[in-house]
Image (cartoon, helix red, strand yellow):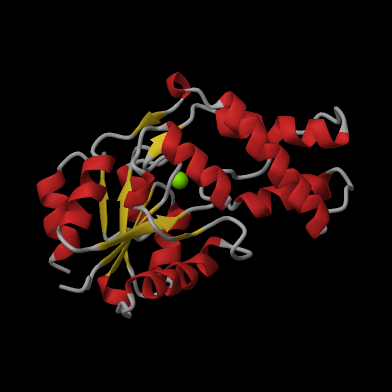
């Protein structure tokens, strides 16, 4: 039976946590490429942001060029810094996420990623956390658009290419841990399932417009019903 439901998972704070290793690897990449200029993300909202946008903000703040070639060098250096730093003890899965993704796939839902991470570093994190990366065979990533809202149609188009069918917006559920995840769903008529395993509470996520906000993803039975009975 062809998939009628599409479920898109955010990574940081939703599938896993890296306890600051990802941010640390990014900052070391800036220093490796441009010397010690006191790089930081002070004053930049990181949760829910796109890696490509974070790169641009930091480079602009230091008066450095952020053209494609500089971006490519940064991505490559960040990838190797993250690969080196992300040992299994520094990353953990969020409760229930692996089981939920697996059960959704087993019930015929299309499952993919919608994340601010670059594609290559998304894969490093997913694997380091012990996920079977084939659970997420397509996705939209942090260099696919200027803001998270732009990633939603990209992810749906890639789901269509992968599964050979279209998905109605009302059958698309986006799972994430920040108001920006909620926004990128609601802006396109999709359903927003918010989870409080990141920096925001269920009350804050409900205020942001989430259709459902839960403490974590461990109530598999109830979440499967909510997602698949859309
Ligand atoms: Mg997140």
Which residue extends farthest top?
89
Q: What is the quadrant of the N terminus in the image? A: bottom left
Q: Nearer the viewer, residue 39 or 210?
A: 39
User: Can the viewer see residue 104?
Assistant: yes
Whether residue 35 is situated above or below residue 230 in the rendered picture: above
Q: Residue at x 27, y 75 (%)?
A: 170
Q: Is residue 214 above or below residue 141?
A: above
Looking at the figure, which quarter contains the C terminus? bottom left
Write down the quadrant of residue 187 in the picture: bottom left
Residue 199 visible somewhere in the drawing: no
62 left or right of 29 in image = right
The picture places residue 85, in percent across and down from the top left corner, at 59, 25
Q: Is residue 105 left or right of residue 44?
A: left
Number of marks in the rendered image:
0
Residue 155 image position (x, y, % from top left): 44, 67
Say which residue appears at 74% left-offset and 35% top-offset: 29
Instruction: Tell me which corner region of the image, top left, top right, bottom left or bottom right, holds residue 31.
Output: top right
In percent of width and height, residue 164 lies at: 33, 77
Give the residue displayed 61% in from the left and 26% down from the top.
84
- The image position of residue 183, as x and y in percent, is 44, 63
Q: 164 left or right of 148?
A: left
Along the viewing direction, whichever of 184 and 94 lies nearer the viewer: 94
């Amino acid at each position: 039976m062809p998939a009628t439901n599409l479920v898109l998972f955010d990574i940081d704070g939703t599938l896993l946590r890296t306890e600051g290793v990802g941010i640390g690897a990014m900052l070391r990449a800036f220093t490796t490429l441009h010397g010690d200029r006191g790089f930081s993300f002070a004053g930049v909202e990181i949760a829910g942001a796109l890696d490509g946008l974070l790169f641009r903000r930091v480079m602009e703040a230091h008066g450095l060029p952020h053209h494609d070639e500089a971006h490519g060098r940064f991505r490559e250096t960040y990838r190797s810094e993250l690969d080196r730093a992300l040992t299994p003890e520094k990353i953990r899965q969020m409760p229930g996420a692996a089981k939920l993704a697996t059960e959704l796939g087993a019930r015929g839902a299309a499952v993919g990623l919608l994340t601010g991470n670059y594609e290559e570093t998304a894969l490093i994190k997913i694997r380091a956390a012990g996920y079977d990366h084939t659970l997420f065979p397509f996705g939209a990533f942090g260099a696919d658009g200027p803001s998270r809202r732009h990633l939603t149609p990209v992810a749906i188009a890639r789901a269509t290419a992968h599964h050979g069918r279209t998905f109605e917006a009302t059958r698309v559920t986006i799972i994430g841990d920040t108001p920006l995840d909620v926004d990128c769903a609601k802006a396109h008529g999709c359903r927003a399932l918010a989870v409080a395993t990141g920096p925001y509470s269920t009350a804050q996520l409900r205020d942001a417009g989430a259709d459902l906000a839960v403490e974590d993803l461990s109530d598999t039975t109830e979440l499967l019903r909510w997602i698949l009975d859309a």
